[in-house]
Amino acid sequence: MSMQSASTVAERLFDCAQDILFFVKDRQARYTAVNRTLADRCGVRHKNELIGRTARELFDAPFGSSYYAQDRAVLEEGVEIHDQLQQVPQRTGRPGWCITYKFPIVENREIVGLCGICRTVTSAEPRPDSIQRVARAIDHIQLHYGDSIRVDALARIAGLGTRRLERLVKRLFDMTPVQLLAKTRIQAASRMLVSQDVSVAQVASACGYADQSAFTRQFKALVGATPMHYRALHRSVAVTSGAPGAIMR
């Protein structure tokens, strides 16, 4: 299935999801496919009004410039964005919160675009000020996953009690902070195993594991393969089809 036909199928599917913003962008970060919810959020009548435009053109600062910078990182560096808590403008004029995922689209071992979703944080979930505090902790995990990180330290960064942070993270991500940290580390390890010629021990150390055997056990539990098997499998796939990325169960 071509990128265009796959985008069309996904677009039709996500048109049915009112709490999800769906998009596909080309190599210049211009929208090539969007769902109805994203068009509504941008205040336009037809989805076609977004096609060919960038986030920087659609959203006022600082939102548009922030989204565009994310897009460039995905398109130029192959960065994958997971579990990113960020604010998105709403039709009411007040920003709401969403959880963002963005991934590069690779054809013939070249990045040709990106796809992504933003899941809206509903009014039934934590208050905006609480979400902003959780976002501080999540940002710290994503920037410092290779360091030793304790939940009580994350709580201090967020300005919340430890149990309060654990409850909020569970409600937002259906994971505990410890599980979210482990997922972030394994995702980083997956990218390193495929893209860098370093040993498994070096990958483990860079991703915050002092014990290679513990890293291997956790990697296999989350990914379904040992680090060595994963590297061999995905490098073989990359050579034959250019397909990248981690498989997270």
Image (cartoon, rainbow, N blue to C red):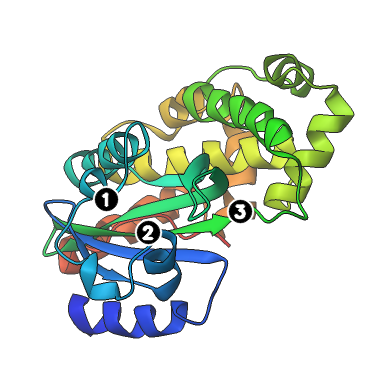
Compared with 121, 249 (above or below) is: below
* Res 208 visible: no
Indicate the amino acid at tag 2: Cys
Q: Residue furthest front?
A: 92
Which residue shows up at 51% across the image and 82% down it?
16
Q: Position of residue 118 (x, y in %)?
A: 48, 56
Q: Quadrant of the N terminus?
A: bottom left
Residue linked to disc 1: 58
Q: Which of marks 3 and 2 is in front?
A: 2
Residue linked to disc 2: 42
Q: How crowded is mark 3: few (under 14 residues within 10 Å), some or many (20 or more)?
A: some
How far apart marks 1 and 3 lie (CA) works out to 37 Å
Q: Badges 2 and 1: C-beta atoms under 8 Å apart? A: yes
- Give whichever of 169, 198 is nearer the camera: 169
Which badge, 3 or 2, is on the more N-terminal residue?
Answer: 2
The image quarter in which residue 180 lies: top right
Residue linked to disc 3: 222
How far apart marks 2 and 1 lie (CA) works out to 7 Å
Which badge, 1 or 3, is on the more N-terminal residue?
Answer: 1
Left or right placement of residue 1 versus residue 45 in this view: left
Which residue shows up at 55% across the image and 58% down it?
119
